Every structure is written in C-alpha cells, then in structure tokens.
Image (tube, coloured by chain):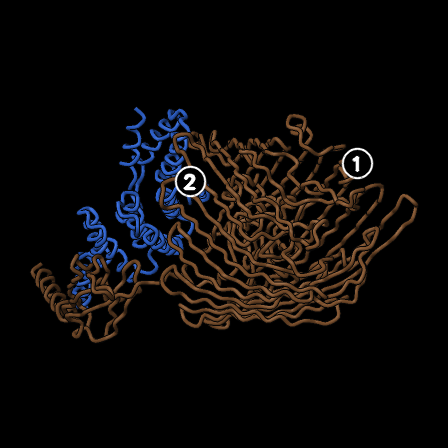
Amino acid sequence: MNLYFFIKSLCTLVFSTVFALSFAQTMVNGTVKTTLGTPVHGANVFIENTYDGATTNADGTFSFTSTSTGIVVLKISMIGFQTVRFEQDITTLKKLDVRLVEAIKALDPVILSAGSFHAGDASEVSVMDALDVVTTAGVAGDFIAALQTLPGTQTVGEDGRLFVRGGSADETQVFIDGLNVFKPYIPTSPNNPTRGRYSPFLFDGITFSTGGYSAEFGNALSSVLLLNTIDEPKDTETTISLMSLGLGLGHTEKWDKDALSVNMNYINLAPYNALIPDKTTWIKLPESMAGETVYRHKFTQGMFKFYSAFDYTRFSTDEDIVGEDQQQRFDLNNANWYSNTSYKGLIGAKSKISTGLSYSKSKLQINENEVNVEQQAQGIHAKVVLTHDVSKMLSLNYGAELMYTDFVEQIGLTTNEKFENSFKGQLSSAFVETDFEFTNRFAGKFGLRLDHHSMVDQPRFAPRVSLAYRINKGEQCSLAYGNFYQTPFNDLLKFHPDIEFQKADHYLLNYQWKQRKQLLRTEIYYKNYQNLLTYTTQNKGVLENIQNEGMGYAAGLDLFWKDSKSIDFLTYWLSYSYLDTKRKFQDYPTQVMPSFATKHNASIVTKYWIDAWRSQWGMTYNFTSGRPYNNPNSPNFMSGRTKHYHNLSLNWSYLISPQKILYFSVTNIFGFDQVFGYEYARKANANGVFIRKPIVPSAKRGFFVGFFWTLSTNKSLNQLDNL
Amino acid sequence: MKTMFTVFLLCMSQVSYSQTNFEQAMDQAEALVKEGKLIEAANLYERISQVEPDNWLPAYHLALLKTWPTFMAADKSNVEANLELAQEYADIAEMNAPNNAEVYVLKALILVAKIAYDPATYGMTLSEKATELYQKAIALDKMNPRAQSGLIEMEMGTARYFKQDLTPYCERLQKVLKLYDAFVPGSKYHPNWGRDGVLKNLENCK
C-alpha cells in the first residue's frame, strides 16, 4: 500500500504542478466609467469563455486574476450600455480605463413617424391601446370616434366619418390586414353621425396615418387607416354585452394552431327612444344586425387569416323640409357583406410574402320623397407584397394590387320613369419601396407607386419619401413628402366622365419626444390639391360638366401630448390642430374653406382610475371653432360661420369582478347648443328670403349603459383536487 | 503496464475528488446570493452561462436574479431593462430545456413582475398570459410546487382585490405546501425555492 500512497502523492504533485504551470495567474484590473466619466457600479468584466471575471465596485474599479494566457477577449457588459470587447494579450490588460457608451436598444429604432399614429400594438409610437378606445368618454366603443380625439382630424358632428387635415371623408381609405374595405361606416339617416362598422376588440394594431404614408397604400388623397386583426387571441372565451342600444355576443375558440372568433350584434334604438325621445320623426327606428368572424391558422412559417363581416340596417323617418309644411319620407335598407383572406409568411430566412384577396358586396335601397334609388356595388381587391432584407441596412418592399368595382344604380321615379347608371372599373397598381437604415440614428424610406384606372385618362407615378433622424434617446425629427392620387368616387364614376386622377402633394415635418409614459408630438404640414372634381348639379341629382377643374390647399399644425406619468392613476391627452384650408371642388363656384373644415380643433381626454372603487372615470372635452356654411341670402359663397362647438362627455366603468364590467356614459352633459351648419330652403319665400333651419344633433344629450361579461373557460380552480 | 494503468486510474480519481469548475462557480454564485451580493451573483451566472451555453441552469438563475429584485426595487428606472434581460435569459433556458415546467414558471414570474411594475399598462394584457404560462407548467408537471403556488397566488391576488373569500385559496396553498415538502430537485443547482413565499402568504389566511 505504500506504493499507493506514493503514487497518490505523486499525482497530487504532478497535478498541482500542471495546474500551477498551465493556470499561471495573471492579474487584470482597471476602471469602468461612462463617457461622462461617472464610475459604473455593477458592470460584469470577464474573459470570454472562462469563469474568470469580476464585478465593478462603486468607484468603477475591478480586479481579478485569470489563468488564461496569450490573446484573450475581455468583455465588459452592463445593463443600459453597449457591451465592450477588447481582444489583446492578457498581460496588457492592466490599469484599463474603459468608457461605456449608452445602448440604444433594438426596441428603440428610428421610426418613420411623420404623419402616423399607431394604436393598439406595442410599438414605440403607440398612442392608444385597445382599451383606450373603449374607455374614452363620448365615443361609445367606436374606434373611429376615438381617433377623432387625435390631432389632424376634424369633428364633423352630423357625419361622424374621419375628416383629415382639410380633406373630405372620402379621402380616407380603410384597410383590414392590408386589404381595402369598401364600406367602413354604417349607414345613417341624413345629419346623424355614423360609426365604424367593425368592433375594436378584433384588432390589435391600428395605424392611423394623417399623411405621407407608404407607397404600399394608394387611392387616398388624405389619409389611411390600417387595421390588423389579432394574430393570436388570448383565450377561449365568450363575451356577452347588454347595452341600452342592443345586444352583443362574441365567442373565441382557441386550439393549438387555429383560432376562431365570432361576434354578433343586434342594435335597436326603439327602446332607448321610447325612454328618451329625440327630435327626429321616426317611422321605423334604426335596427341593425351585424356579425363578424375571424379564423386564423398558424403555419410554421406563416399565418393565414380569414375575416368576414355582414350587416343589415334599416330605418325610416319623416324629415322636415325647410320652407315647406309637409314632411318627406326617407326609408333606408342596407345589406353589406365583406370577406377577406390573407396570408403572411416567410420565404427562406430573408424574405416575406404578404398576400390577400377581399370581396365586398353591398346593396343600398333608399326611398326619398317617393324616388326609389337602389345601388348594388361589388368590389374585389387582390394584393401581393414581397419584402426582402437585402442587408442589415437595406430592405426592399414591392408589390402589386388590383381593385375591381362593379356598380349598378337604378332610380325609379313616381312617374314610372326609370334611370340606370352603372360602371365597371378597375384600378391596377404596383409599388416598390426601399427602407434604408443609414446609421442607427438616420433612416429613410423611398417609394414609387404606379396607378392606372380603366376609366381615368392617364396612369400616374407617385413618388414618396420619408426620412427620420434621432436627435437623442426618445427624441426624433422626421419629414415626409409624397404624391397621392385618387380616382373619383362611385357617385361620379357612374356618369362616365372623361377625367383624370385627383392629386394631392403632402409635405410634413414632425418632431417627437417620447419617454416612458409621456409623448409629445408636433407636426406641421402643407397639402396641395390639384385636379379635384367639379360639376354642376341639375335636377333629379344628375351631375353635369364633371371636370378636373378643382384645386385647393391645406396647411396646419398638429400638437399632441399624452401623459400617464405625472399623476398616479391618471392618463390624459391633449390634442390641438390648427388648419388653414381652401378648396374649389364639387359645385363650389370659388375656392373657399369647405363646410367640413374648422380652423381650431382641440380635445382633452382624461381617464382616472380609482382603485378603491375599482372604477375608471373618463372625461372628454371637444372644442371646434365655427364651421363654414353657405347662406344663399348672402352674395359671398360659404361666408357664414356657425358658433363654436363644445362637447363634454363623461363615462364611468366599474369592474364588478374580473369578468364583469358595468359602463355608463353621457355625452354633452351640459347640453351645449351644437350647430353643425344650416340647411336653407331650395326656393326663396315671398319676401325673396331663403329661410333656414339649423343642423343640430337629434338629441341634446346621449346616454349609454352597458354591461359586459366575459366567460372564460380557462378557470383553473380546483385543479389541485385532481392530484 | 499494469502499474501505469493503476497510476492513470488513481490520477483520474484524484481529479474527480476536486470539484469541477462549473460546480465551484455555481456554489460561489449561490454563496453570493446568500450574502446578498445579487449583482455579483448575477454577473457570475452570466459568466457561467457563456462558458456553458448549452446548460439551462445558469441562464435560469440569472433570469431569476434579474426578476426578483424588481419587486422590491425602490429605483424603478432599470426595472424594464432588467426584465428584458431576464426574458432574454429565460429564452436561452427554454432553448436548452424545452418543455420544462420550471422555465415556464420563470417566464410567468417575469410577466408578473412586469404587471407589478406597471399594472395600468400591463395588467390587462399580461395577466392572462401569465396564467396561461403557469397552466402550461402545471400541464407539464403537476407536482411542481412553484407552478401550483404561482398560479394560486395570482388568483388569490385577484380575489383579494375583488374582496372575495380567500378560504379556498388558503386551502389550496396548504396542499401546495405538501408538494414543496415532497419535492426533490434534480440536483443541488436545480430550482428549489418558493416554500417561504407560500408560508408568508399563508400568514394572511389566519
């Protein structure tokens, strides 16, 4: 056994020697500071691929020994700073003076933010989330109304659609998963505001661009609203809504790779109107039935979605005619079907494809003063977009799309006379766009779009450029320029006029400052309109002399401030828009400020969470300066101005349990007189005066009560009992 | 020849007597945690993780160390960055140990920390995701006490907020305590925490 002990000691000796030799200790030391010279405490300093290292002390110093030899890589890592590497001989790693540069997170890239607001997604420029949309006072769950609290929009109380920066509502196009929605709003009786057709809960990304948008989107002079349906719903659940206006039922079923959501709504204003009657003489109160469904399937490399919606609305009213004693009947029936399928996926490591097809069919029947108008429109939109990441700095985006419209209108008069107007038209477009990230501070997007319409004279090339420069962390400047073309709307195309595209040029300059929970956004813009359509109105609504004789401009300033930081539990935002615009279009004889435009527009939205009451209180205040209206008694066209508009709305949401929410809201709580314009008699009276009636909301105040209940099947209670 | 072989064997046994570098470093990191030197411990786990890129344990411990202190942090300025780093290492852990209940618990805990940090922003969106992760962990290993107690504590928080009766949750926590007692970690470096938290929570039940 002596031999054993001998060998063992020998081994120990040999090993110790080998260890001592090969693991000769080398001292590494130095100091770590920021670029400003402040010592960095807690940085990790180590030799790559070894355990050897140390943490810096409060004074930034570090020191450790390493058994490595020769050329090594010394790494210094610290949260919030860029990791530093030194590749040199270990013996030279002494008395190091390391300076760390603040990291610009991958999550914090330069964003081409000129013109656009993002909502609902986690992106850096997100200004609202889905919940914000629902809990904003005065919007009653309508995301279109919620967007109207952002700058760049005008409150047009009797219309309700999106009017952006001096543009008419037709100049905004809405897209779901990249595909055009032909009829984004529900039909309403004249002078009653509309709502968006689609439920905010189905979308998780809303991008609202008030100008300067990507070459991927066309046929819009002023604005695009991009809605993306939720990729992956949270859970299998059922939602029930009971509202003063109707009922809603939704269900989402989630499987491993598939999910299906169905949403149904039935709206009937009759019970509400029986309690709180409005000024309209209703024959049949608005009743509508709507349903939506989204199906998604996840592939390993992509996502397939099918979205479909239908709705049916009808109502009937007797309308006063200014200057006449009798009333005029107005009946409306509208049925609308919309479907879209889309696929987004990867092709290889560096390319993406995004493709889709949408189909819409709508039937609108209006009977006004015994003139029967029946319109049937069908639309198809097909689109394919490819994206290639050429390098880290450059990506290429290109695609093509086709939009087909088939429109038929039949007009039947009491005299048994019948007219028919119809057209079939197609818009074919292609675009190419490159995204450059020149440095991590400076990025640009350069695009070109080609549009050709079968009924419009010449194809058009539209260049678009946007640039962004980061000044500091969270602070950036961007600018955008572009040409935007749009075909005339169905109401004009049906007369087969010989015309060109309408055109707008956008110039935008944007400054944005963003910190956690605070955002300041200012933008100035100039928009130049050319080739707007003008016409003269003949009897029976026939339009003549349709030409591209119109023009105009819009210039303004938009301000936005959102803050959820300064006061605990309070989120608020302020919007202000200044707008200077004039245009000659439609049947305007001269270039004037159009009736939907207002010089000053401001909104204040606040939401305050009272934890002890499990309640959120919301308040929205809107102000709009006077709207232009035309007084036929005055020699100056469109020279009248209504009084200023004020609206203060309040809401209260109460969380009864995690699954049950009770919601109350009152719009125009102080009952301000709101005048949107004036309607004048068609003919002057005996004294040669055109008499008028103000266009006002049908009810002074609006009340809304809702109860929302989510039934989640995913309850884990009592799971332990199964153990 | 025989002697040579004996020498070789004996020498090998000599090596196995001494701890591996990995174990030594892991022990040292744990000691640092016990001393309250959390930054030093986290940095050491980071070093171990880059030497052992295929081992989920150092990444797991690093992520856990980046997450826990955020619940108590007085200075909230680095919370998001820390949780982001935690998430990064939780992903590394998941890559090396897919379908591991402990990793799912960790990922849920990171979300809970995010909710605790900013309930107004993350409460609605992340609480269901966190619940889902705990449920996945339970589905993978229903005897895992951390998965069970994590889920119960989340539900208990909701119940407390809505002033509901806590008795059923307390009863379930008592049962989980038995799971903790029966739990045998995979090695001394495997996750083995959470019992104290349950005991503390149970104090509220009296």
Chain of the residue displaying label 1 = A
Q: Secondary structure at mark 2?
A: helix
Q: Which chain is blue in the rendering?
A: B
Instruction: Examine the rendering and report whether any part of residue B102 can be seen.
Output: no
Quarter of the figure with residue A221: bottom right
In the image, which is nearer the foreground, mark 1 or mark 2?
A: 1
What residue is pinned by disc 2? B138
Which residue is more in the foreground, A397 or A705? A705
Q: How many marks?
A: 2
Give the CA distance from mark 1 to mark 2: 69 Å
Q: Position of residue B116 (x, y in %)?
A: 35, 42
Rendered image: mark on residue A564 = none
- A55 vs A238: above or below: below
Which residue is more in the foreground, A589 or A395? A589
Q: Where the N terminus of chain A falls, by quadrant?
A: bottom left
How packed is label 2: few (under 14 Cα within 10 Å), some, or many (20 or more)? Answer: many
What residue is pinned by disc 1? A327
Q: Colour of chain A?
A: brown
Marks 1 and 2 belong to one chain: no
Instruction: Examine the rendering and report whether any part of residue A679 can be seen.
Output: yes
Residue type at tag 2: Ile
Residue at far front of view: A687
In this picture, residue A294 sits left or right of residue A38: right
Which residue is more in the foreground, B24 or B75? B75
Q: Where the C terminus of chain A falls, by quadrant?
A: top left
Residue at (69% x, 55% y) in the render: A637
Residue at (75% x, 45% y) in the render: A690
Residue at (61% x, 46% y) in the render: A642
- A535 vs B131: above or below: below
Residue type at tag 1: Gln
Quarter of the figure with residue A437: bottom left
